[in-house]
Image (tube, rainbow, N blue to C red):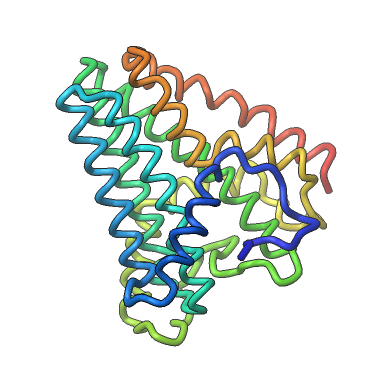
Amino acid sequence: MSKLTTQDQFLDLSDYGRPFGRWLANSLKNTRFTPIDVTLLFGFSGLTAIYCILEGYLYWAAFFIILKSIIDAADGELARIKNTPSYTGRYLDSVFDIILNFLILSAICYVSNTSFWVTLIAFAAIQIQGTLYNYYYVILRHKSTGGDATSKIFEYKAPRALPGEKQKTVNIMFQIYTIVYGKFDTIIHALDPNAYKVKTFPNWFMTMVSLYGLGFQLLLIAIMLPLGWMEWIVPFFIGYSFLIGVLIPVRRMYIV
């Protein structure tokens, strides 16, 4: 099941794990496994990748980073197949992502003797890049008739709990989400405050934006690690932010 209708689907360079994610979700649809179980599984894969980085098993680190991205595509698919969407799962997924991003960069920082403060800048850069992708993607999903709308364009207040989850849990997860993502959301919303008014985004533009999707970011890291380019990962992602200065002006001038 897709998050977008057929006419709004685009080549998402960050979503290479979707075919396997669908297969895994379909394999689990008649089991007791829940989407949150799958989220915990991709978290374990991410932690395994971090261990491999610290121990110098860089090919295995690359494998588990990509596996994490692939499994990450399955929790939402399973929720749609079982018709059990939840805000708890949506926020948990995002919180796990940002924690794993920080730990992966921290491990790279430790092993490569990169400055911790420069690593923090790279971490912030990765999050801002990913937030731009999510911002445009969520807007497109809301514009797409019948598209998935569990994620909100503006996360200003805790949503009402969906069937099968507790409002208290949703409130807690929303607060955690706001703490870890709020500043990044604020920055992107300030840079392009009127993006939500567009009728739709062209497929070519969303493909460009998907260069900032988390899956593609992790793929780049997974490629650079076994090639012996570990010391270049942190400065690369700082410089990679230059695309923000291209994508936002293109959207504001040509896509309305």
Residue displayed at 51% across by 64% down: 77
Q: Locate the N terminus and report the quarter of the image it occupies.
A: bottom right
Residue drawn 30% across and 43% down?
100
Residue at the extreme left = 55
Count of numbered badges drawn on the protein: 0
Quarter-wise, where is residue 60 in the image?
top left
Q: Which residue occupies 47% across, 78% down?
A: 84
Task: Provide residue 25's location: percent of width, then percent of height.
Answer: 46, 64
Residue 236 picture location, percent across and down: 45, 19
Residue 239, given in percent of the width and then of the height, sits at: 50, 19
Q: Nearer the viewer, residue 133 or 44?
A: 44
Q: Is residue 105 left or right of residue 26?
A: left
Q: Is residue 40 left or right of residue 238?
A: left
Report the front residue among 4 and 193.
4
Quarter-of-image position of residue 57 = top left
Residue projecting furthest to the bottom: 163
Closest to the observer: 230 or 17?
17
Please give the name of the residue rendered at 48% of the width and 41% of the height, measured from the top-left corner: 214
Q: Position of residue 203 (x, y in %)?
A: 77, 44
Which quadrant of the figure has residue 213?
top right
